[in-house]
Image (tube, rainbow, N blue to C red):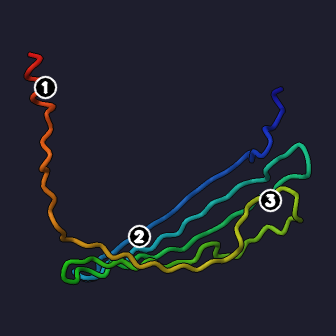
Amino acid sequence: MHKVTIDGMAHHKGNWFATWGHRFSANYRLGVGIYGRMSSTRYYQDDGNGKGYQTWRLSTTHDLGHFKATTWRVEAGVDNIFNYCDRTPHGLHLGTTTPGRTGYVSLTIRFNQGKKLSNKYKSNFKQQNNDED
């Protein structure tokens, strides 16, 4: 039993990342990150093993400051920089299911001001505790 490998397990897996950020002005901040994931061979009892792999992502964030009552952030990056794609035939075990290199861009707008909600429903928690004393 000491040498039995659990189906679908890799002996070695790892994730790592490095990030850097700098505020260039009151209205602009840049963030850059690189992220990596690796796995050694995934072992199976039947239908062959899944291949080991490494994938890397490069990501940037751009905080664009305040415009009236909003804050804007643009994120852009490339996932799977080196375009690793597992070409194992259909029906056999894959090391990873990534489709290959993928680019992405997102825009986030946050509203800084809004209608303040009042708590018009009072809690009777304090009242119940005082009654028990």
Left or right: 71, with 61 as reference point: left
Label 3–label 1 contact, CB within 8 A: no
Q: Residue at x 66, y 77 (%)?
A: 101
Disc 1 from disc 2: Cα separation: 52 Å
User: Observer-nearest residue: 105 or 26?
Assistant: 105
| Residue at the spot of label 1 | 128
How dense is the environment of label 3, judged by Cα within 10 Å: few (below 14), some, or many (20 and up)? many
Closer to the camera: disc 3 or disc 2? 3
- In three-dimensional space, the C-alpha distance between marks 3 and 1, rounded to whole angstroms, equals 60 Å
> Closer to the N terminus: mark 3 or mark 2?
2
* Residue type, mark 3 in image: Leu
Whether 53 is drawn above or below 2: the answer is below
On the image, the x and y values in percent for residue 132 come to 12, 17
Residue 32 screen position, x and y as percent: 44, 74
Q: Amino acid at mark 1?
A: Gln
Give, as a three-letter code, the residue at label 2: Trp
Relative to 105, 69 lies left or right: left
Q: Is residue 70 above or below residue 119?
A: below
Which of pointers 3 and 1 lies earlier in the amino acid sequence? 3
In which quadrant of the rendered view does residue 38 lie?
Answer: bottom right
Image-based side of 118 in relation to 95, left or right = left
Find numbered disc 3 in the image and state the secondary structure of the residue it sits on.
loop
Which residue is at the front of the view, 125 or 92? 125
User: In which quarter of the view is residue 66 placed?
Assistant: bottom left
Q: Secondary structure at mark 2?
A: strand
Q: Residue at x 13, y 23 (%)?
A: 129
Picture disc at residue 20: 2
Disc 2: CA contacts within 10 A as few (<14), some (14-19) or many (>=20): few
- Tag on residue 94? 3
